[in-house]
Image (cartoon, rainbow, N blue to C red):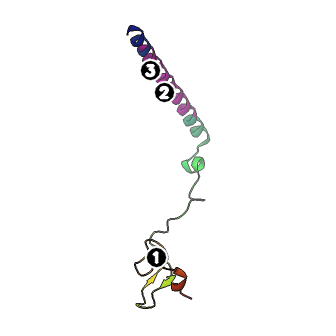
């Protein structure tokens, strides 16, 4: 039992050393990055890119209907949860031409 306890204590000591070494490396890396950012007067956009290349949200944009229920005239854009009148049916039959 004492051998197990000793091994567990060694493991805990090693984990603490690893944690401490990791924190020291991170602190050094952050300091080096901050120094370079200050020297070159970089911004977040310089480092991580600006709005260029990002997709804009399509939330709230109106879309033309793609399907129409001939019985009631109800329409559906084809986005989101399908209405009951088109569920489990061939959608080609309801396409707006």
Point out residue 72 in the picture as x, y percentages from the top left corner: 40, 90
Residue 1 placed where, x, y %? 37, 10
Question: Of label 1 and label 3, which has the lower sequence position?
Answer: 3
Quadrant in the picture for residue 40:
top right
The C terminus, quarter of image: bottom right
The residue identified by callout 3 is: 16
CA distance for labels 1 and 2: 57 Å
Q: Is residue 2 above or below residue 53?
A: above
Specify the segment rendered in magenta. Answer: 9-32
Magenta includes 15?
yes
Give the number of the disc on residue 23. Answer: 2
Residue at the spot 42% in from the left edge and 86% down from the top edge: 74
- Which residue matches tag 1? 88
Other-residue count near label 3 (Cα within 10 Å), few / some / many at <14 / 14–19 / ≥20: few
Disc 1 crowd, CA 10 A, few/some/many (<14, 14-19, 20+)? few
Provide residue 46's location: percent of width, then percent of height: 60, 49
Whole-angstrom CA distance, mark 3 to mark 2, is 11 Å
Furthest residue in direction top, as rendered: 2
Q: Quadrant of residue 3?
A: top left
Q: Residue at coordinates 48% horizontally, 27% vertically from top-left?
A: 23
Horizontally, residue 16 falls left or right of residue 35, namely left
Residue 33 quadrant: top right
Q: Secondary structure at mark 1?
A: loop
Image: 92 above or below 8: below
Q: Are marks 3 and 2 in contact (CB under 8 Å)?
A: no
What residue lies at 43% left-to-right and 90% top-to-bottom? 73
Measured in 3D between alpha carbons, the distance from the residue under mark 1 to the one under mark 3, in whole angstroms, is: 59 Å
Rendered view: 40 above or below 87: above
């Amino acid at each position: 039992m004492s051998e197990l306890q000793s091994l567990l204590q060694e493991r805990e000591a090693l984990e603490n050393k690893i944690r401490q070494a990791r924190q020291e490396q991170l602190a050094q890396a952050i300091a080096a990055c901050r120094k370079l950012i200050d020297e070159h007067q970089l911004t977040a956009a310089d480092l991580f890119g600006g709005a260029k290349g990002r997709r804009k949200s399509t939330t709230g944009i109106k879309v033309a209907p793609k399907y129409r229920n001939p019985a009631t005239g109800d329409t559906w854009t084809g986005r989101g949860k399908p209405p009951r009148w088109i569920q489990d049916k061939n959608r080609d039959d309801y396409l707006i031409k």
